[in-house]
Amino acid sequence: MPSARRAPRRGPAWWVVAAALAMALVVVTVTTSFLLRPAQTVQEFALSRVVPEVHSTQVVTEDRAEGLHLYLVPHADDELSGWTSLAEGSDLYPVLVLLTQGEQTIRCTAEGLQRHLQAELGEEHPTPDPTTGRDTPACRQARWNAFQESLREASEHTPSMDLTDAQEVTTTVGGDSATVVRGSGVTVIALDLGDTQLTPESVREAVDHVLALAGTELPDLPLTRITSSAYVGADATGSKDCAQPALCPDGEQGYGYAHDDHRATHEAARALAPRATEGAFLVTHPYDPAANEHRALPPKVYDAFMELGPGDADSARRLGSHQRIYGWLAFPDVWRVGELPLQSTEVFFSRVQSYEVFAP
């Protein structure tokens, strides 16, 4: 009896092979991306577990906004201090109020600028040339131009700051001349309350006059949040009250800085908190016992502001916008880069930003 013929062996269907190849490609891609990404430090890993990253990629026009975000900036370059609060209020229409023209900086002298500007490392020369002296029109204009350029570059990652088609007008705020630049997703108001002359009373009075512009130069919206983008680190000693060890490394302390204009902005915002439904966000450091909120910029956004090239402060290329545009104002020699504002590293603009949120 002839033996039965065996059925021919068939290979897997073509679609099974294709699916297997696709899955293998995905695995290889993911694995390669993981291996090639920069290693996360122990500090970065610990911070990522306790501090949320915030970033806004939306433009909230006044007809879609839930309210106003009053963002107080004492000097041009301080706007970065509270950027996470600005980004977190993604349903609010931001009103950036520049309180002074920064006209008293010693960098507006020939000796001061020559000592600090490092154009060979990528720092931009301020325009116009501010070396006509402190408290001169050129010094004021150079600070204002730097502020506007900083916002223009920031709009690449925070699109609400786009002022490309904005209208600039000169108006009167509280009887004094002011510049108002109104974009689709932000309004900037430049006041002149006097560099080194701010008081809590003068700032509160100026805010009253600014809010009176609602319905004319400003959208007619309720006041929802106030941010004092003015770092204050007066009580810089280490605190046992810090709830998160990752935010308060042992043996360290918060960066000490207590400029009188920053203090005045800080205290004015605290006093104004009852007028805003979300209260006031006051920039401080994590060792401050009053610090009760912490937010972080995503690394890519922080780098867009603060990135330095390889090398130490004497040789690193200034790559981030804050480093290039405001390098002439940097201290001690460059804007130091770091996760936290620590005295040992002299970091003033840190990736993690801490606030005392003073509720109404």
Image: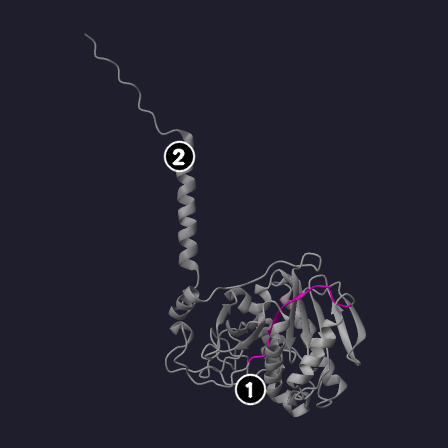
Give the dominant element type of the magenta stretch: helix, strand or loop. loop
Using a 10 Å C-alpha cutoff, classify the residue at mark 2 as few (fewer than 14 neighbours), some (14 to 19) or many (20 or more).
few
The quadrant of the picture occupied by the N terminus is: top left
Q: Is residue 219 magenta?
A: yes
Mark 1 → mark 2, Cα distance in angstroms: 67 Å
Residue on which the image places disc 1: 258
Label 2: which secondary element: helix
Q: Nearer the viewer, residue 335 or 348?
A: 348
Mark 1 vs mark 2, foreground winner is 1
**Residue 56 percent across, percent down from the top left:** 59, 61
Tell me where residue 272 sits by quadrant: bottom right
Look at 43% across and 66% down and name the residue there. 50
Counting from the top left corner in percent of width and height, residue 323 is at 58, 76
Q: Position of residue 352 (x, y in %)?
A: 49, 71
Determine the residue located farthest toward the left in the rendered image: 1
Q: Residue furthest bottom?
A: 111
- Residue 90 lies in magenta, yes or no? no
Would you name the residue on which mark 2 appears?
17
Who's the residue at 64% across and 75% down the image?
A: 72
Closest to the observer: 270 or 160?
270
Q: How many marks?
A: 2
Magenta segment range? 217-231
Instruction: Decide: is 81 above or below 9.
Output: below
Q: Quadrant of the C terminus?
A: bottom right
Determine the residue positioned at 40% across, 78% down. Answer: 241
CB-based contact (under 8 Å), mark 1 and mark 2: no
Q: Which mark is residue 32?
A: none
